[in-house]
Image (cartoon, grey):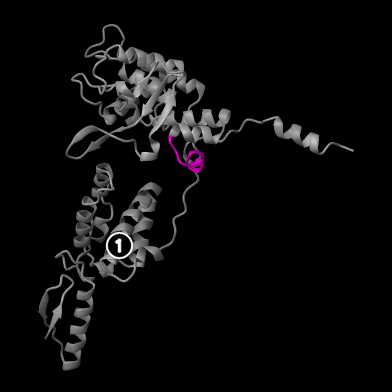
Amino acid sequence: MTRFRDWDGQTRKVTATGSSRNAAQAALKSDLAARLRAGGSGDLLTASSPFLALAAAWMEDVMLDVDRSQGTKDTYLRVLVLPFFENFTIREVTVGRIELFLRQQRAQSYPRAKHSRTLLGMILAFAVRREIIPRNPMKETSRMKKPPHTPKALTTEQIAAIRLAAREWRTEDGRMGPRSDGQVRDIIEVMLGTATRIGEALAIRQCDVDLDADPPRVHISGTLVVHNKAGVHRQEHPKTHESNRVIGMPPFAVEVIRQRLALLDPEDAEHLIFYSRVGTPLAPYNVRRTFREILRNAGLEGLNITPHSFRRTGATLLANELGMQAAADMLGHTSTSTTKAHYAEPDRRVKSEPAEVMQRLAPPS
C-alpha cells in the first residue's frame, strides 16, 4: 500500500496484492505506472480501461471543439470501429488487431476502410495525448492502396436526357397526386451552370445574386447542412471557408434564377431561391430522391450519376477549355490537384499543337 498523487492532483491510497512481497510490489508499481498515464478530467482512464470508455471520452472532447462543424461531429458519432473493439481494453487495441479490422473494412469498400482508419487513428491519438498509451499503434499499420479512380463527366446526350426528363417529371395529363413545382428542374440548371455542390445551390439567397453585373454572378457564401437535432438549416459558409467564392453564370442559369426571383418579395433579401411549400429550406436528401426518379425516367438509372456529377461536368468543361486553374477557381479548390484527381475527367482529345511544335523544332534534314 502507498499514497499516490493522481493525474487530477488528488492524493489517494493505492493498494495491490501478490503471492509474495516482491510480486505485490511489482503489481503496485505497474498500477502506479498506469495511473500516471491516466486520462485526467476526472475520467482516470488507464490502458486497462475498456476501449468503449476511451471512445466515449474522445467524443465528449470532440463536442467541445469549436473549430469542427456540427456536421463533422454528427459524422463522428457514426463510429464504425466500435463493434469490432467493444470487448477489448485500450491496450488490447494492437497493431495486429487493427490490421485485421481494416482488412475486413476494406473488403466492403475503400471509403469505409479509409473512414474507419481515420476515426480509429483519432481516438488512439487522443489516448496518446492523455498519456494513456505511449504511442499510437495506427502509425505502425500498413498503408491502404487507393483504388484507381478516373473522374467521369456527363456526356452531352446524358445532359439532354436529364433536362428533358426533369421538364416532364410529374407534368403528364391525368396524373394523380401533386404536380411538379419545377424546382428540381431549376436546381439542375443552376448546378450545371455553376458547378456547385447540392448544398451550396440550395443555400443561395436573394441577396447572393447580382443579375445586373456583367456577367451576372452569384456569391456562394453558405451551404445547407442536416444536423441530428436541428434538422435542415443554412450554414453561413460553404463546405470549407476557402470555398467562399463569386461565380459568373451562363445565360441558361441566369434565366432560371430570374424566374425564381420573380416569386420572392424584393425586400426579403435573406430568402432562399429554392424553398419548400412552407418556405423552409429544401432537404438535400429529398432533392436527391427526386433526382433519382428523374434519372429512372431518363433511362440513366444504375450509371452512378448523382447531383455531384454536374460539378464534375463543369470542372471537366472548364479544365478542357480554360485550364485546370480556372476549373479549380470555379469549384472553390485551393489546389488544382484536388480538381484534377477527383473532378476533371482527363482530356483525351488529340491536340494538333504538340505535333506542330515537334515539326517546327525537329524538322527532317
Question: What quarter of the picture does the N terminus occupy?
Answer: bottom left
Main secondary structure along the magenta-highlighted residues: helix
Task: Tell me the magenta residue range.
Answer: 332-341
44 is higher (above) or lower (below) than 289: below
Question: What quarter of the picture does the C terminus occupy?
Answer: top right
Picture mark count? 1
x, y percentage for residue 75?
Answer: 27, 45
x, y percentage for residue 334?
Answer: 45, 41
Is residue 69 toward the left or the right of residue 10 in the image? right
Residue at the far bottom: name it.
Answer: 21
Q: Splitting the image into 4 quarters, where does residue 191 fall?
A: top left
Is residue 6 toward the left or the right of residue 154 in the image? left
Please indicate, yes or no, whether residue 345 appears anywhere in the rendered image: no
Residue at the far top: name it.
Answer: 173
x, y percentage for residue 35?
Answer: 19, 75
Residue at the far left: name it.
Answer: 13
**Measuring 16% from the left and 68% from the top, which residue is drawn there?**
44
Q: Which residue is mark 1?
A: 124
Q: Splitting the image into 4 quarters, where does residue 244 fall?
A: top left
**Measuring 40% from the left and 20% from the top, which residue is drawn there?**
189
Secondary structure of the residue carrying tag 1 is: helix
The amino acid marked with disc number 1 is Leu
Residue 254 falls within the magenta-colored stretch: no
